[in-house]
Image: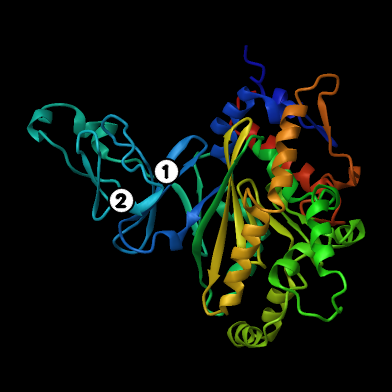
Amino acid sequence: MTRFRRRADIAALVQDDRVHRDVYLNEELFALEQQHFFANTWSYLGHASQVPAAGDYLAVEIAGRPLLMVRQGDGGIRVLYNRCAHKGSKLVSDDCGSTGKFFRCPYHAWTYRLDGAPLAIPLKSGYEGTRLKDCESGRGMVALKHVVAYRDFVFVKIGDAGPDFESYFGDALGAIDNLVDRSPVGRLRIEGGVLRNVIHCNWKMYLENINDTVHPMSTHESATQAANALWQGQPADAPKPMAMEQILPFGAGYDFFDRMGGRIYPNGHSVLGINFSIHSGYAQMRDYEQALSDAHGVERAAEILQRSPQNSVCFPSLALKGSPQAFRVIRPLAADRTLIEAWSLRVEGAPALLFERSMTYNRLVFSPMSVVAHDDVHLFENMQEGLRGEGNDWVSLHRGFDPAEFGQTTLEVNGTNEILMRNQFRAWVKFMTLSMQD
């Protein structure tokens, strides 16, 4: 039986200060997300550095659709559906690689140019006098219409509804600018592979946690206690090993996280740590700072270096860390299954230490075997199971609620305010219902 046929059915799941447990549990809702929400929003696909040469491709699934990001012969990037126009076979099975100068279907050997245009088919004479040239199968691979490469971060929108790229992200793109401008030459490269973790929880649960500053003191208590025990007795001015530099701030206390502040933007985007963050105390590098000043000017360089947010969320799929230079991609697989990818970035023109920080942080914090992530994964999966318990259909998002927050397109708040999560759910309702019938 279909429970969510109308916009009002979806809107009823998100109240001013709480959300219904069905947003995490219900398989029908997840299917509607695939159909509507992810078609109406802009999702991160990949980074241009992952396809450096003509014919290089990256295969990604977004909202159940198999996609290919392909470098063209003229240097441009095109995104195609990874399916043959004949029988629908996926043209490539690897996550990434090079297809050379054309795609060749492994089933019947139909071939396509890098832009998806048909190239050749076996037994061509057998199609003479048929309608092949006049139908979709004769036109080749289907290209996505809505593709934007913003400073080498490639985003796609699957459907035609919803805002254009600039309108959707707005000022939230400043998080990407801050990340890219940390390079004196304005270029980043993905390096060091990827850490992938499939978590048995709903994707929104993970995304909320990115903006949750109250959990570290309890969830990650064992990690911070171990780090404090190891570092106990060291002089206050003693240089910290990188692992200590990155782990110790997790136990900074409620007041620290509250004072770091947060900012919400329209459409679910946010920045946590607008005043400072656990990344603000990293050791300085004078030569690097001078290189940034030479490239961007003293004022802009200072702005870049002083702004090290805890997390910047480009809703719904991307979470960025300007320092360390790392990011996570949230890829929903089912109502109770989410793939998390953690990537490291090489900052061109910067010391190798920055890349070392990125790799170390990802291993320490986002690896499924890290001293931090296993705490989160355990609790995400616990929550997914616990929400099946009856007697309370709602999840609280009351902390910091103020009716005056409605109508505020951009708002700065304290760092423990759950408005950063409420903002995500209000965007979820907006884009879930945008293309639905009343």
From the top left corner, tell me how far across and down residue 194 is, in percent: 52, 55
Question: In the rendering, which numbered label is found on residue 121?
Answer: none
Q: Quadrant of residue 437?
A: top right
In the image, taking residue 402 as reference, residue 298 lies left or right, namely: left
Can you identify the residue that label 2 sits on?
A: 115
The x, y position of residue 228, in whole percent, is 84, 64
Residue 26 lies in quadrant: top right
Query: Relative to 130, does residue 243 appear above or below in the rendering?
Result: below
Q: Earlier in the sequence, mark 1 or mark 2?
A: 1
Q: Name the residue: 23% across, 55% down.
A: 101
Tag 1, which secondary structure? strand
Between 435 and 174, which is closer to the camera in this rendering? 174
Residue type at mark 1 is Leu
Give the position of the C terminus as an image quadrant.
top right
In screen coordinates, is 427 left or right of 85?
right
Residue 395 screen position, x and y as percent: 82, 32
The N terminus, quarter of image: top right
The residue shown at (67%, 60%) is: 171
Q: Nearer the viewer, residue 219 or 124?
A: 219
Vertical side of 313 occupied by 131: above or below = above
Q: Nearer the viewer, mark 1 or mark 2?
A: 1
Dot 2, crowdedness within 10 Å: few (<14), some or many (≥20)? many
The answer to whether residue 427 is visible is: no
Establish if 387 lies above or below 217. above
Determine the secondary structure under disc 2.
loop
Its colouring scheme is rainbow
Q: Which residue is denoted by mark 1 in the rendering? A: 67
